[in-house]
Amino acid sequence: MTSAVVLQKVPINTGQRIMNSSNPQESIATSDQEPTTPSRTFISILLRSALSIFSARTLGLLSAAIIGNASAAKEDRFAFYFYFHEPEDFLSESFNGNPPAPAVLQFDNSNKEVVREVFERYYPAPRIRYWSADGYTAWIFDDVGKEGYQPTTSAFLVKDGQIIDARVLVYRESRGQEVGEEFFLEQLEGARSNGKRLTQEVDAITGATESVYMMQRMARTAIALDGLVD
């Protein structure tokens, strides 16, 4: 006796399969896809596993590449250091080969306001070291051209409110390093502070406007600091 096969109506191309009512192990495809066999299923699982492993490995390599590039970019950014002078050399030359021991200027509510007026912000530390002998004071400190820039370390020798010598010790930006050259720094020598300016004109440098202004600000700050010590 021939058994009847009952088909259930399903949407076309949904991939749903209908079981043969007389033989549950047989199935009828309701779409135009070929029936899935155990071998095909096994191959599909292998392919998916391989793709997963490949994707994870690829993602790992990409992540490593991105991190590596970021690290390299960071290193490149700091590879632009320009070392002009050593602090020891500056101090030795400033004090005829016999620099004094460093002293400390402690900032209080009064003198920190004096510094803020010329430094254009509060000095970032509660104290600053300086060297003093025979009426000269030497100052070494950092400043930035503007927020987000890398700090520039400069040194100034001051006497009676006048810049005697100015040096850039370390310049850390990729542009504007000309402010560390003698032709620029000699413009600061002999200058005094005049409010938010110096008494001497300082030539601009193309592409280094912020750095030029920074050096003038640092010179005025050194003069102000000199006025705070005996």
Image (cartoon, grey):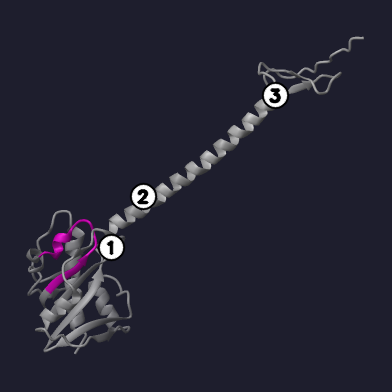
Mark 3 or mark 1, whichever is nearer to me: 3
Mark 3 or mark 2, whichever is nearer to me: 3
Residue 157 location, quadrant: bottom left
Image position of 63 (left or right of 222)? right
Q: Indicate whether residue 173 is drawn in magenta.
A: yes
Q: Position of residue 38 (x, y in %)?
A: 70, 27
> Which residue is depicted at the point 7% across and 75% down?
190
If you read the primary sequence from the N terminus, does the residue marked by circle 2 or circle 1 appear first? 2
- How far apart are the alpha carbons under marks 3 and 1? 66 Å
**Residue at the disc numbered 3:** 37
**Residue at the disc numbered 1:** 150
Task: Say which element carries label 3.
Answer: loop
Residue span colored magenta? 166-181
- How far apart are the alpha carbons under marks 2 and 1? 20 Å
Q: Quadrant of the C terminus?
A: bottom left
Dot 1: within a 10 Å radius of its alpha carbon, few (fewer than 14), some, or many (20 or more) residues?
some
| Amino acid type, label 2 | Asn
**Residue at the disc numbered 2:** 69
Q: Quadrant of the N terminus?
A: top right
Q: Is the C-beta separation of discs 3 and 2 under 8 Å?
A: no
> Which residue is depicted at the point 65% across and 26% down?
40
Residue 138 location, quadrant: bottom left
